């Protein structure tokens, strides 16, 4: 396996582009970039992610932000966790590699 951890530069670049394109999401994109770069996530395969203890897919998240206050984007509320998933998927796709699957349960601290 190639070392994939010049990945932060790619994530930061994608975050900047996305925030410029979607200013209403910019604050959450900024936080998503930090989560993605901070490796504060685990991927379990089949579009299932653990991000800071929330169960996240590309289209859903179990966090309260989705229920309450996240901005609506393409007809659904989108939180920083979903944005993290989107950023990571895109970054790994740009690097032409699969997202590494975590074989452990991510310790939940947040
Ligand atoms: Zn969320």
Image (spheres, grey):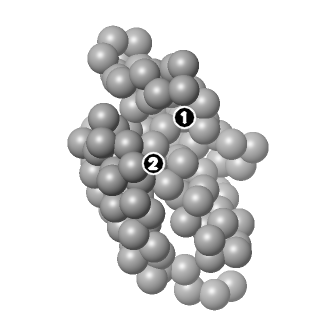
Q: Residue at x 71, y 49 (%)?
A: 45
Give above or below for 94 relative to 3.
above
Residue 84, numbered circle: 2
Mark 2 or mark 1: whose residue is earlier in sequence: 1
| Lateral position of residue 43 relative to residue 52, left or right | right
Image coordinates for residue 19, horizontal then vertical, percent: 34, 51
Query: Residue 94 or 40: which is nearer the viewer?
Result: 94
**Residue 67 visible in the snapshot:** yes
The quadrant where residue 4 appears: bottom right
The label nearer to you, 2 versus 1, is: 2
Query: Residue 71 or 54: which is nearer the viewer?
Result: 71
Image coordinates for residue 9, horizontal then vertical, percent: 39, 77
Q: Residue furthest left?
A: 27
**Residue 106 visible in the snapshot:** no
Residue tagged 1: 56
How far is disc 2 from disc 1 in space, using C-alphas? 9 Å
Give above or below for 45 relative to 75.
below
Secondary structure at numbered mark 1: strand
Give above or below for 36 relative to 45.
below
Give above or below for 16 relative to 52.
below
The quadrant where residue 10 appears: bottom left
Secondary structure at numbered mark 2: helix
Mark 1 burial class by Cα count in 10 Å: few <14, some 14-19, many 20+:
many
Query: Residue 57 or 87: which is nearer the viewer?
Result: 87
| Lateral position of residue 56 relative to residue 103, left or right | left
Query: Residue 76 or 85: which is nearer the viewer?
Result: 76
Mark 2 burial class by Cα count in 10 Å: few <14, some 14-19, many 20+:
many
């Amino acid at each position: 396996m190639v070392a994939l951890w010049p990945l932060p530069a790619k994530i930061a670049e994608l975050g900047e582009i996305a925030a410029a394109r979607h200013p209403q999401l910019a604050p959450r994109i900024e936080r998503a970039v930090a989560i993605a770069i901070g490796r504060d996530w685990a991927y379990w395969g089949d579009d299932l992610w653990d991000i800071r203890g929330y169960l996240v897919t590309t289209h859903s998240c179990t966090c309260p932000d989705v229920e309450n206050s996240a901005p609506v984007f393409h007809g659904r509320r989108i939180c920083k966790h979903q944005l993290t998933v989107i950023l990571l998927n895109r970054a790994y796709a740009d690097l032409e590699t699969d997202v590494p699957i975590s074989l452990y349960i991510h310790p939940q601290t947040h």
